[in-house]
């Protein structure tokens, strides 16, 4: 399995989608299906990890009372703002 720095989120997601199509197609042998499933689970974990990291970096711009702008991190309970 490629390390997080070796593959982008988009590449991992594309590969995961391809694995899903192959599994749904029913053309793989049992052994190949198991290998594909295991790789898919690794890619899912990788995608989740990349998304969690990105979420931690998100900020939003908030207008202060004096009219200035400041950035603040987005907290989980602030998701409803968007």
Image (tube, rainbow, N blue to C red):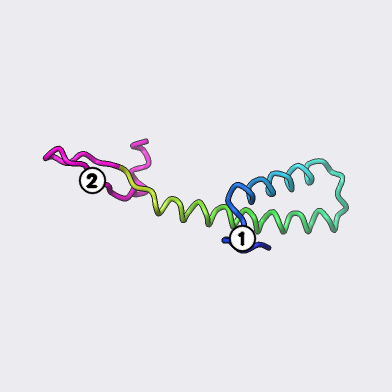
Q: Which residues are magenta?
A: 61-82
Q: Residue furthest top?
A: 82
Examine the structure image and report whether residue 66 is included in the region drawn in magenta: yes
The location of residue 35, given as percent across then percent down, is 78, 58
Residue topped by disc 2: 70
Residue occupying the point 21% across, 42% down: 69
| Residue 50 colored in magenta in the image | no
Classify 10 Å Cα crowding around label 1: few (below 14), some (14-19), many (20 and above).
few
Secondary structure type for disc 2: strand
Q: Residue at 53% of width from left, 57% of height from top?
A: 49
Q: CA distance from mark 1 to mark 2?
A: 34 Å
What's the residue at 79%, 45% (across, down)? 22
| Residue 66 drawn at (x, y percent) | 11, 40
Which residue corresponds to the image point at 86% horizontal and 49% vertical from the top-left?
Answer: 28
Q: Circle 1 sits on which residue?
A: 6
As drawn, which residue projects farthest toward the left?
66
Q: Is residue 59 above or below residue 32?
A: above
């Amino acid at each position: 399995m490629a390390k997080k720095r070796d593959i982008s989120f988009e590449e991992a997601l594309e590969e995961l989608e391809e694995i899903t199509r192959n599994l749904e197609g029913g053309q793989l042998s049992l052994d190949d299906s198991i290998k594909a499933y295991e790789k898919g689970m690794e890619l899912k974990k990788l995608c989740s990890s990349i998304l969690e990291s990105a979420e931690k970096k998100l900020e939003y711009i908030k207008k202060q009372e004096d009219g200035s702008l400041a950035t603040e991190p987005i907290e989980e309970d602030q998701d409803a703002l968007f």
